[in-house]
Amino acid sequence: MVIINSYVELFINFIGVTPNEYKKMGENLEISYGFGFSPFGKTMIATTRKGICSLEFYDDSYDEVLNRLKSTWEKAKYTQDDKKAQIQLDKIFIGKEKVNLFVKGTNFQINVWKALLNIHSGDVSTYSDIATLLGKPKAVRAVATAIGSNHIGFLIPCHRVISKTAAMSGYRWGINRKKIVLVYEQNNI
DNA sequence: CTCCTACTCCTGC
DNA sequence: GCAGGAGTAGGAG
């Protein structure tokens, strides 16, 4: 069951490439990344010309999220710009405007991530609902794995997927943060 | 091929 | 209520 309410939401344009497609274009990719703050703590954001390719929360050290960025887009050229990053973060979390996303994943992962975009702010869904939505009701664990490998926090709303028994289940950036994001959204509809 | 998993269901306490 | 096990489909190497 995916509950859909109607209210204004970020308009998200989604471009996905498979690992093979990325191999062909990887050499020319330029990534601008930086560290800033969002309502949910320290945040790293990275963008290409095609769109945002990473948005991750971190607590003490950014080593982990930066390493993950660089291993995902291993052939890209990187420039750091924290000021630009903070401006982007402010637009995302405070304003409401169009956002382009650029992600790398298998077809299965991309389909799962697209499905997440249909869960609106303030609503939640479950892993089995997403699996059913994709026509593979038994692929629950595979769906969960795909959701867990999402690198674009908040914008691809993996925090809106919880387990069927109403437990929060997992979150890459900490269960506690998952709760905080959900409460924040329910209060900001 | 052999692992592993941000799941779910069913049991038995 | 909680703990443990089986079933499960895909992904990663």
Image: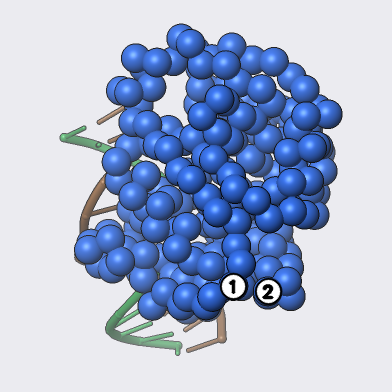
Chain colours: A blue, B green, C brown
Q: Chain of mark 2?
A: A
Q: Earlier in the sequence, mark 2 or mark 1?
A: 1
Q: Residue at x 37, y 31 (%)?
A: A17
Pointer 2 and pointer 1: residues touching (CB < 8 Å)? yes
Task: From the top left corner, tell me how far across and down residue A135 is, in percent.
Answer: 22, 63
* Amino acid at the residue labelled 2: Ile
The kind of secondary structure element at disc 1 is loop
Query: Can residue A13 be seen here?
Result: yes
- As drawn, the label of residue A168 is none
Left/right placement of residue C7 relative to residue A150 reads: left
Q: Quadrant of the C terminus of chain A?
A: bottom right
Image quadrant where one finds the N terminus of chain A: bottom left
Q: Which residue is mark 1?
A: A7
Residue under the image location 46 percent in, 9 percent down: A27
Q: Is residue A168 visible?
A: no
Q: In the picture shown, does residue B12 fall above or below A126?
A: below
Q: Is residue A4 left or right of residue B8?
A: right
Residue designated by label 2 = A189
Give the residue displayed 74% in from the left and 19% down from the top. Answer: A80
